[in-house]
Image (cartoon, coloured by chain):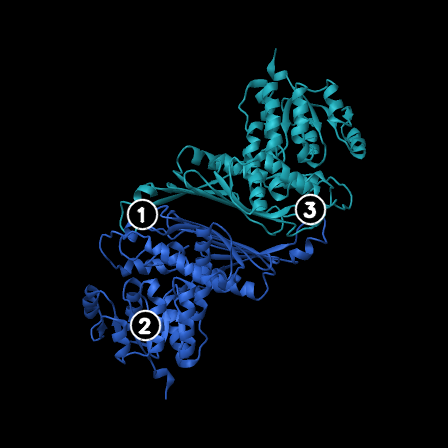
Chain colours: A cyan, B blue
Amino acid sequence: MDKDAQSLRVGIVGVGNIGNVHAASIFQGAVRGMTLTALCDVCPKKRDRLAKDYPGIPVFASHEEMLASGLTDTVIVATPHRLHPIIAADAFKAGQNVLTEKPVGVDCKSVRDLYSVAKHSGKAFGIMFNQRTDPLFIKARELVKSGRLGMPKRLVWIITNWYRTQSYYDSGSWRATWDGEGGGVLLNQAPHNIDLWQWIFGMPSRVRAFCYNGKYHNIPVEDDATVYAEYENGAGAVFITTTGEYPGTNRLEISGDRGKIVIEHGILSFYELSYPERDYCFYSSEHSAPEVTVQKFENKKPVLGHKQILTNFASHILHGEKLIAPGYEGIFELMISNAAYLSTWTDDWVELPFDEDLFASMLDRAAENTVSKVVKGETTSPQGYRDRWQVQW
Amino acid sequence: MDKDAQSLRVGIVGVGNIGNVHAASIFQGAVRGMTLTALCDVCPKKRDRLAKDYPGIPVFASHEEMLASGLTDTVIVATPHRLHPIIAADAFKAGQNVLTEKPVGVDCKSVRDLYSVAKHSGKAFGIMFNQRTDPLFIKARELVKSGRLGMPKRLVWIITNWYRTQSYYDSGSWRATWDGEGGGVLLNQAPHNIDLWQWIFGMPSRVRAFCYNGKYHNIPVEDDATVYAEYENGAGAVFITTTGEYPGTNRLEISGDRGKIVIEHGILSFYELSYPERDYCFYSSEHSAPEVTVQKFENKKPVLGHKQILTNFASHILHGEKLIAPGYEGIFELMISNAAYLSTWTDDWVELPFDEDLFASMLDRAAENTVSKVVKGETTSPQGYRDRWQVQW
């Protein structure tokens, strides 16, 4: 059989902003190895629109019907976050490969349940961490993982360029609610950055966080958060994010005992030391420091992002290519953001791994206490969305 | 009387690195309105050197003798930090004007005692916050205080370019000890930055801090600290400093609802919004943001720093010029750094103002528990010092 001729038969569950972006990419033939064969959305209005926009593609009202149709072997889950693990698990049980949108879920407990189903199925499992395809983050990871940066000391990420107006939050009843999205900026905008943090710098051992609900918007979840984290080796991390500042900043700094990486304005600057600082410190005179050379890296090519993750997922299944973003890695960033909530709620440190049952019950309580949102009307606007998901500098 | 012909008769107590810098400036006639008339140091070796370096200037072994000599009307205190309030108070009691090195003391309690003596004396009182003379910080303060930046939202200062080798710490027995300096990087290097933080952005209402003793050096005090702070109006601040990273960063970011200030590499960038974000947020469509214009400010002139503070202090006394750094403002940065220690020691939030008696007793306990440092020999090295006190970008 000619493997190149093979194509996954892909169904998408939840065709809102991002689901529609993926649907369009695949439908237009822009994703090698994927063919759009089914769509599914619970909203009748959306289904009508999908039928027009994607002629010839069957549209289902429930994921169960879609899974039972036999039209797909691969499912993309792009529903509100809280449903990701439920629908993904159903898809695995139906023998499908699953690519889920980020975050993999809203609480680690339900994600672990999903993971055991996924493992049992033996099918491919990916997650849409499209910012992992950005060459600057790939470069930063290489410098850290190869040891060229030396012993990691600190990561500071000011990622405050996720500006949102109230109108954005009013555009969907599930948006920015504890029961819909399971959180605010940490759960919906920052998962990319938190994933990159752990992907490049590793997982911290404990977290102390300061999250503020509805600080800048009429929403019950946090739109401003600062996460402080400690590592086993003594390294530290500070992560600052909000949807309430404009113009925001996207500046990642990572220091190690062989230098420093700074990424800002689309340029990675690597300050490399001639000699490891940890040795230098103890064998040098008072007023001196190791020599530094500065190297700049800039990416001029377009970042394929979502499409690259889709293509890679297909290529993984069809040709054994290594996954850029395995679904099983989705839990790491979620552990950090869950821990950040838990730390805020308990006003204390949270050691990782934390009590995931406790977190799930506290999240449920937060959801129960949420007053229903009044929204101006459900809208989707793929164009604005397209502009948004690229890394913004 | 011709006021321009007048000159303060200045004695300096503690003529180590920085004391020697001031002595030389005044002795060489570089400070209008100041004449060097006395020096004082407890170290016999230093006194021998001072007698040679400053011919004709009487050198005393104790500040009491110097104050009793009648040779001075103005005293500069440049001893180890813990002695600042004691010697300054003695000087005020002897009817002297006092300019103290930073920090004004090591604990707020003893500083308040000093303040009542100072007020009672009615004499002039200044503090050596020389970085307040930097035009970029002056500009940032103007933008904030004038309201041009709008409602303050956040300050983030990564000030990790205070790199020190172990040799620096080994150069003086009082250095980096709880009983000598009363702390580490927050007490000795960062007071300038913490003062600028409060000078530009105001005082926070509570603090949660993470200080690490001897993380990068063989010292009993902190050489790495992250301070998280909250403000009454909901604003937040993150302050990150260390002497253990190289090359470090000096990047100050301040955001408000009318824009953002970033100072890095000696350039202030002001991103000014066409419309206040706080109004815009609630009256605009989903995918939009206010217009931004960017203005850059760079200072090409030399920053006079110490000399400007000295000249200003003389001019204040002689001609009523407004003080750049009143001694009474010294306590603000100290409140923040004391609160940072207290927060670390209690592993909890510290509300400002905090229990200053409790802090003083905890600091005493830390000092008692300190093992005496083994030093390679007391050294002073004014040249290295001179290079160090300018704002480093």
Chain at numbered mark 3: B
What amino acid does circle 3 point to? His
Q: In this orientation, which residue lies closer to the viewer: A223 or A23?
A: A223
Secondary structure found at label 1: loop
**The label number, if any, that marks residue B230 in the structure image:** none
- Quadrant location of the C terminus of chain B? bottom left
Secondary structure beneath dot 2 equals loop
Residue with the most extreme bottom position: B1
Task: Find residue A180 and report its horizontal and vertical position in percent.
Answer: 69, 38
Q: How far is mark 1 from mark 2, CA to CA?
A: 39 Å
Of labels 1 and 3, earlier in sequence is: 1
Q: Is residue A296 above or below residue A71?
A: below
Please tell me if label 1 and label 2 are on a single chain.
yes
* Residue underneath mark 3: B287
Task: Write down the residue under mark 1.
Answer: B218
- Residue type at mark 1: give it: Asn
Q: Residue at x 69, y 46 (%)?
A: B287
Please name the residue shown 28% across and 50% down the image: B167
> Residue A69 appears at what percent x and percent y?
75, 19
Mark positioned earlier in the residue sequence (3 or 2): 2
The N terminus of chain B: image quadrant: bottom left
Q: Answer with left or right where residue B165 lies relative to residue B252.
A: left
Which chain letter goes with mark 1?
Answer: B
Q: Nearer the viewer, mark 1 or mark 3?
A: 1
In the rendered image of this protein, does residue A155 appear above or below residue B315? above
State the residue position of label 2. B30
C-alpha span from label 3 to label 2: 58 Å
